[in-house]
């Protein structure tokens, strides 16, 4: 099931538009090399993971219940929030390394168009 959802995210219109926009920016800047195209694919992979993380945050919320089985239970921050911040930071680093802009690229949720 997870692979199916990942495939749907990768095949979404938003993912395709994002990849195409970044590749177009590479061409326009005259830096369309194999190494830079590989970095774009790394960016897309992080974007797909970020979609999963955002689904988890929407599904479980920002605060989740826990029970460690030792009699301790309570609530804690959803760890996906920290993952989302780390993913966003790494994605921005890739854009910066390429000298590209995220503006105009498809953002948001891959499931908007599904």
Image: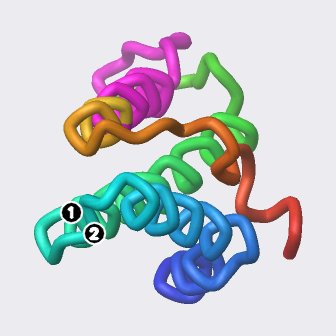
SS label for mark 1: helix
Residue drawn where x is 62% and y is 42% of the image:
54
Q: Residue 14: horizontal and vertical position, in percent? A: 71, 65
Q: For mark 1, does the 10 Å Cα neighbourhood hold few (<14), some (14 to 19), or many (20 or more) residues?
A: some
Nearer to us in this view, 24 or 97: 24
* Circle 1 or circle 2, nearest the eye: 2
Say if residue 95 shows up in the picture.
yes
Camera-side residue: 73 or 82?
82
Quadrant housing residue 32: bottom left
Residue 36's mark?
1
- Left or right of 32? Residue 46 is right
Residue 18 against residue 84 in the figure, above or below: below
User: Could you tell me which residue is drawn at 38 percent across and 14 percent down?
Assistant: 72
- Residue at horizontal 46 percent and vertical 32 percent from the top: 84
- List the residue tagged with mark 2: 32
Taking the image as shown, residue 70 lies to the left or right of residue 7, namely left
- On screen, residue 41 versus residue 102, left or right, reads left
Magenta residues span 69-91
Toward the viewer: 77 or 7?
7
Check if residue 94 falls in the magenta segment: no
């Amino acid at each position: 099931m997870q692979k199916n959802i990942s495939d749907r995210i990768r095949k979404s219109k938003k993912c395709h538009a994002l990849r195409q926009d970044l590749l177009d920016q590479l061409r326009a800047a005259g830096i369309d090399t194999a190494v830079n195209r590989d970095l774009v694919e790394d960016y897309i992979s992080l974007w797909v993971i970020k979609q999963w993380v955002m689904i988890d945050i929407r599904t479980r919320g920002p605060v989740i219940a826990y029970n460690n089985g030792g009699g301790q239970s309570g609530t804690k921050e959803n760890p996906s929030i920290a993952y989302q911040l780390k993913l966003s930071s790494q994605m921005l680093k890739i854009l910066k390394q390429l000298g590209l802009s995220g503006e105009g690229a498809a953002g948001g949720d891959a499931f908007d168009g599904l």
